[in-house]
Image (cartoon, coloured by chain):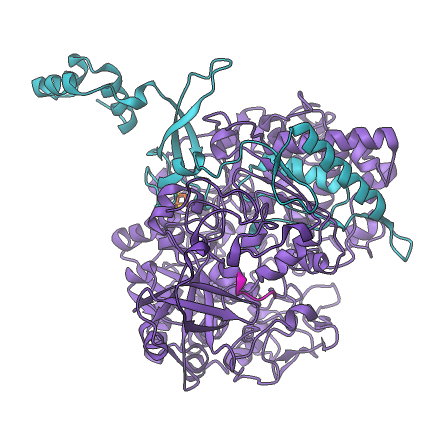
């Protein structure tokens, strides 16, 4: 029987019928064991392929989440492990990757946009509309005031140096490219990423 | 990486220097163990600390931080002196035979053309002597005194084993043992792989560290072959991708360059990009620069980029300086020249040198926008967290926005790993609370600004108003759409220029960058990704792990740029006739009519060996460079310069101590210490349990390594009366950290020029947010100076003092800002 490790877990967990364990050669002992074991919790979970968010080894991972992704049902991650089929990590994870569940569910995860006014001593929770409207306005004000269309030699240079951006090192290429388009179309040059640190 | 992670198993010798793969890249390091077990490979580790990588090494040698060039130049000297180079490879595949211009010189630590005032070089003598046709002159016999080989011999002659040991503090016997082992891979069928990371890059001479090793590899014939290469292990999960897409001050996607002020027109810009072959018959990707550029502009601006407006060339900003890198950005901020800053998944309060300067800079902004899944120090820089972040919020006038984003588990898209693989990942769960994707947030800002500019006008709105934004949902582009846009497609029917036969229909996704045109009939957001998302589908989502001949290639797993090629320069894996140097592990070979093998050829697929086209097809000379011409800012040959803060003189040239071409702002120079006040060498590093400043938010990692510490050797501990676990005050000219001392046998004093030199290791992982205990952050201590080419900060070698101190009062380890309500929980 050609069965991957994941297939094995699915099968033994999902079936739990004596016959499926019997088919795997566990015989009667397996039947008894199966009867005493509570259902394997990952069987009802959705398995999704992803990669570790930390270093550039980019280990393959399997994320198990609850919720069937039906409309209006929120899904949440309940378990993460190495992808045994991945050609680089072959199922292993290091102490960083093995703790991925704790970063997805970290108490420090942000859930609400927040704003701190000039001189304020506390954060205020705000709506997305408030935050994005205000940021866009501040950016436009600064850009309109400080944009350099031509340099002293009269060359068109169309650059904006007084607002800068640091781009994310764990964001996808797709997020990066859209960020690039937006920032460069504004003429932004004080623009960097985390390649060096 | 030039090669793949799995390919490491093909190596005969693995050199880990400038990195600590066992702890920083553990699952990749497995392939080193595989090489040891299956290929009887020897592992060599050179590091200031006896790391976990060192603990499984066959040979370990200590080295003083910041002296790798001296060590590796010594290796080059050893290889040349003992004739341990792969002669045929060096002759055919490097520029050893090319003749350098008369006038090129090196004297007292400086190359010809130095301008002290500007701290830069006039590089006009750093080039080849050309013949009437414009080709570099060659002497295959290596008799000419100015052929690269002879200039190299002369240059490295000073790096004798005695000198190496004097500078590096490495015992001579260990050093020579390593030279001997490295030299065994000069044999054509043997390979050495070089694995490195920030341990080489984070120096004021970082780029030259890497160059020196690349030269070693070229001399040994180890580039392009299985089990060889220069393998930068890279840090963050998509830092390769962000660099590929050009999210750097001076870059455009696919390693094209941002226009400069002097490049007043598109034609002028193109003049510096035109690839002039320096040897007969050479070819290059870069001959197609115009096609890449025009297709990029078509991706950016669609129909608004046309021949009549030079493809909207003027709509891109032009640079008046080499780049607005991070060090310059914070200098500008401190000088009041910046008003706004956006940190997308980036935490400069922890990540950038001289934290005090970072905090002062942020305090001068009008607005700061932080997009992040986590609560970062940067977003909270204005809060008073006690000694770890003293502040008076009332005095800080910066408006701060903290925007919650999704993390990897909550979105689709590609990341590029260090082996250049684009791997698609799938969303597994919904975002917590109101967190949104970066795509949604950026689209939200774009749409708002576009509306405002369309309505009210304002400074140069053309580029923004004409930006291509034809996404199905303009408020949140789908990752698949964007991925297709980067790949590129035909905008009109495209025919084969040679035969006229139809090649692409309008609207068809491109299969390869070779299909790009410079007449506006194709578009591609990032030409090196062409082929990643074709009409056949999303190549990056492929998950077939099969690996012909178990070569370590896995060609159908995801997709690698360029053109799904897994080993760069793989033409060099075969000899000039097209046969593998190592018949046991061929990568590609000439079969009489084309190149075939386990990988996609990095070469014209039907270019005959007899045509004499060099294997390094990106280079104008077609060969690998032992002499870098004008590519590097501090010289065409690497030279040992001391770190900007160093306890040692530069014994090679006392007058030129540190990198003469590195840019240093006066305010930063004033913040540099001297060894009479700060006698010890500090170096930062990472722990295997933590990833930068993120995992202090993850409970398991915070439990494993809960609090800030420095690592010191037993001898220094005894000298200073510091017991295991004692509280210490660690200081540099820029600030101080109060934390515990971890006394180990892993760091030993080095004898440098007859003087014992102590190293203090500073792990970087703690700050004032997260569930781990509060820390000051190692960047409180580090100097604000960078590499002369990349401005990568010098985090790996600087000056410190250390004193025993009393434990801090309990309040300092409590969580939460002092100005606001204390946070619940969190404290361990
Ligand atoms: S599991 Fe470890 S080695 Fe693998 S990608 Fe994550 S951090 Fe890197």
Which residue: 52% across, 29% down? B412
The answer to whether B361 is drawn above or below residue A38 in the figure is below
Return the residue found at the far left.
Answer: A28
Which residues are the magenta region? Answer: B780-785
Classify residue A40 by image quadrant.
top left
The spot of residue B562 in percent (x, y) is 56, 42
Q: Say if the magenta span includes residue B336.
A: no
From the top left corner, tell me how far across and down residue B515 is, in percent.
66, 35
Pinpoint residue B781: horizontal percent, then vertical percent. Answer: 52, 65
Chain B image colour: purple
A135 vs A170, left or right, is right
Residue A186 is at least partly visible in this image: yes
Q: Residue B783 magenta-drawn?
A: yes
Nearer the observer, B348 or B51: B348
Is residue B597 visible in the rendered image? The answer is no
Q: Colour of chain A?
A: cyan
Q: Residue furthest right?
A: A154
Q: Main secondary structure of the magenta part?
A: loop
What residue is shown at x 88% (from left), y 34% (from top)? B457
């Amino acid at each position: 029987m050609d069965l991957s490790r994941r297939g094995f877990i699915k099968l033994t967990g999902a079936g739990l019928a004596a016959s499926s364990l019997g088919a795997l050669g566990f015989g009667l002992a397996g039947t008894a064991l199966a009867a005493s074991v509570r259902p394997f919790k990952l069987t009802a979970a959705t398995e999704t392929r992803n990669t570790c968010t930390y270093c550039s080894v980019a280990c393959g991972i399997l994320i198990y989440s609850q919720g069937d992704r039906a409309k209006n049902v929120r899904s949440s991650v309940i378990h993460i492990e190495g992808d045994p089929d991945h050609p680089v990590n072959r199922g292993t994870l290091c102490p960083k990757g093995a703790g991925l569940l704790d970063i997805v569910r970290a108490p420090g995860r942000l859930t609400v946009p927040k704003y701190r006014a000039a001189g304020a001593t506390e954060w205020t929770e705000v709506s997305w509309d408030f935050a994005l409207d205000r940021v866009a306005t501040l950016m436009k004000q600064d850009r309109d005031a400080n944009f350099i269309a031509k340099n002293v030699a009269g060359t068109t240079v169309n650059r904006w140096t007084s607002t800068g951006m640091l781009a994310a090192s764990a964001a996808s290429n797709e997020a990066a490219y859209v960020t690039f388009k937006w920032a460069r179309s504004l003429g932004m040059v004080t623009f960097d990423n985390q390649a060096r640190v | 990486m030039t090669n793949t992670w799995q390919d490491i198993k093909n190596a005969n010798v693995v050199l880990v220097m400038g990195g600590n793969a066992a702890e920083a890249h553990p699952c990749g390091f497995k392939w080193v163990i595989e090489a040891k077990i299956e290929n009887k490979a020897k592992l060599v580790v050179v590091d200031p600390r006896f790391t976990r990588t060192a603990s499984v090494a066959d040979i370990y040698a200590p080295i003083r931080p910041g002296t790798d060039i001296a060590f590796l130049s010594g290796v080059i000297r050893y290889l040349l002196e003992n004739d341990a180079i792969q002669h045929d490879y060096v002759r055919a595949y490097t520029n050893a035979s090319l003749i350098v211009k008369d006038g090129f010189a090196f004297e007292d630590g400086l190359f010809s053309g130095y301008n002290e005032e500007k701290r830069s070089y006039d590089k006009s003598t750093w080039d080849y002597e050309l013949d009437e046709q414009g080709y570099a002159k060659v002497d295959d016999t290596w008799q000419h005194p100015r052929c690269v080989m002879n200039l190299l011999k002369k240059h490295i002659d000073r790096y004798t084993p005695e000198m190496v040991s004097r500078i590096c503090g490495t015992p001579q016997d260990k050093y020579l043992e390593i030279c001997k082992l490295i030299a065994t891979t000069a044999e054509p069928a043997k390979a050495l792989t070089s694995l490195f990371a920030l341990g080489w890059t984070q120096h004021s001479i970082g780029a030259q560290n890497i160059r020196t090793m690349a030269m070693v590899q070229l001399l040994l014939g180890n580039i392009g072959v299985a089990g060889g290469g220069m393998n930068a292990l890279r840090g963050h999960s998509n830092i390769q991708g962000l660099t590929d897409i050009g999210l750097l001050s001076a870059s455009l996607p696919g390693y094209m360059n941002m226009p400069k002020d002097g490049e007043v027109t598109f034609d002028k810009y193109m003049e510096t990009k035109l690839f002039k072959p320096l040897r007969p018959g050479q070819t290059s990707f870069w001959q197609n620069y115009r096609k890449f550029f025009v297709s990029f502009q078509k991706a950016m601006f669609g129909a608004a980029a046309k021949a009549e407006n030079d493809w909207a060339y003027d709509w891109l900003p032009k640079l008046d300086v080499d780049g607005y890198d991070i060090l310059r950005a914070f200098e500008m901020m401190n000088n009041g020249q910046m008003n706004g800053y956006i940190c997308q998944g980036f935490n400069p309060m922890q990540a950038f040198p001289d934290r005090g300067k970072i905090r002062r800079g942020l305090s001068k902004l009008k607005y700061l926008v932080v997009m992040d899944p986590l609560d970062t120090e940067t977003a909270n820089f204005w809060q008073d967290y006690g000694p770890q972040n003293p502040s008076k919020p009332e005095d800080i006038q910066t408006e701060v926005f903290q925007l919650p984003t999704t993390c990897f588990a909550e979105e689709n898209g590609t990341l590029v790993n260090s082996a250049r693989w684009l791997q698609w990942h799938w969303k597994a769960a919904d975002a917590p609370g109101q967190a949104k994707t970066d795509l949604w947030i950026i689209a939200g800002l774009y749409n708002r600004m576009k509306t405002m500019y369309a309505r009210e006008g304002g400074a140069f709105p053309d580029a923004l108003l004409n930006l291509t934004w034809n996404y199905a949902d303009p408020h949140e582009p789908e990752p698949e759409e964007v991925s297709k846009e980067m790949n590129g497609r035909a905008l009109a029917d495209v025919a084969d220029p040679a035969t006229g036969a139809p090649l692409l229909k309008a609207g068809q996704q491109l299969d390869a960058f070779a299909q790009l045109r410079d007449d506006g009939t194709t578009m591609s957001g990032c030409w090196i990704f062409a082929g990643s998302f074709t009409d056949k589908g999303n190549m990056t989502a492929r998950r077939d792990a099969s690996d012909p001949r178990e070569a370590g290639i896995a060609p159908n797993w995801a997709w690698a740029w360029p053109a799904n090629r897994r080993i760069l320069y793989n033409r060099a894996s075969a000899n000039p006739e097209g046969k593998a140097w190592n018949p046991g592990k061929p990568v590609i070979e000439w079969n009489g009519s084309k190149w075939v093998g386990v990988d996609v050829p990095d070469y014209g697929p039907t270019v005959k060996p007899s045509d004499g086209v060099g294997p390094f097809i990106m280079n104008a000379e077609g060969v690998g460079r032992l002499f870098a011409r004008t590519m590097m800012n501090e010289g065409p040959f690497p030279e040992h310069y001391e770190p900007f803060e160093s306890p040692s003189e530069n014994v090679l040239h006392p007058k030129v101590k540190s990198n003469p071409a590195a840019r240093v702002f006066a305010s930063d120079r004033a913040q540099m210490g001297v060894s009479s006040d700060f006698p010890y060498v500090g170096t930062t590093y990472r722990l295997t349990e933590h990833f930068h400043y993120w995992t202090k938010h993850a409970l398991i990692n915070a439990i494993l390594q809960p609090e800030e510490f420095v690592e010191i050797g037993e001898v220094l501990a005894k000298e200073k009366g510091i017991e295991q676990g004692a509280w210490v005050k660690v200081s540099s000219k820029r600030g101080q950290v109060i934390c515990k001392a971890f006394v180990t046998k892993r760091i030993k004093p080095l004898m440098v020029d007859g003087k014992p030199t102590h190293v203090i290791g500073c792990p970087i992982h703690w700050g004032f947010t997260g569930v781990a205990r509060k820390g000051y952050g190692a960047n409180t201590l580090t100097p604000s100076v960078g590499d002369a080419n990349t401005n990568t900060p010098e985090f790996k070698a600087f000056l410190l003092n250390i004193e025993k101190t009393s434990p801090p009062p309990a309040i300092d380890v409590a969580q939460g800002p002092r100005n606001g309500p204390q946070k619940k929980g969190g404290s361990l």
